[in-house]
Image (spheres, grey):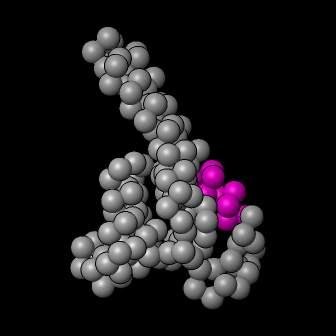
Amino acid sequence: MVGAAVCFGIARALGRPVVERMVGAVPLAKTDSFFERYGSHAVLITRLIPIISFDVVSYAAGLTPIGLVPFLIATGIGQLPATIAYSVLGENLTSGSKIGLWAIGVLASLMVVGLAVKSRVDRQIGGRSPVTSTPVPAK
């Protein structure tokens, strides 16, 4: 949480040019489009999906109008399931493969939940395209 707040604060204080030099233009552009598409839910969604760069999201959030407190709340809620799963995995790693496999299953489930949340938010925002903001035709 402290690291996320520091990245957020750096971006807020120093602005886009500095952040772009730190994380690169391409990752920042991808994160920008994600924030544009998911709005206030973007931080929560990205925290639920463990393969998305934590720091890039924190820096990008600092460039948006989101406040520090809502950012930290979304980060905390989004990281809670993974933190619990990692703790269980770490605690039981040496006690047997059955528990370890269970913990890996929980991590995989967290990824599925993250993707389900992303899908639900997609439906709630009306399937709008991040570039044109026009409805995407149904397939």
Q: Residue at horizontal 34%, vertical 19%?
A: 91
- Residue 44 in the image, given as x and y percentages of width and height: 55, 55
- Residue 43 in the image, given as x and y percentages of width and height: 52, 60
Residue 61, placed above or below residue 5 = below
Residue farthest to the top, as pictured: 95
Q: How many marks?
A: 0
* Residue 113 figure quarter: top right
- Range shown magenta: 115-123
Residue 123, placed above or below residue 102 = below
Of 93 and 5, which appears nearest the observer? 5
Residue 102, placed above or below residue 86 = above
Q: Residue at horizontal 41%, vertical 79%?
A: 29
Whether residue 128 can be seen here: yes
Of 50 and 58, which appears nearest the observer? 58
* Residue 8 figure quarter: bottom left
Left or right, 21 with reference to 15: left
| Residue 127 falls within the magenta-colored stretch | no
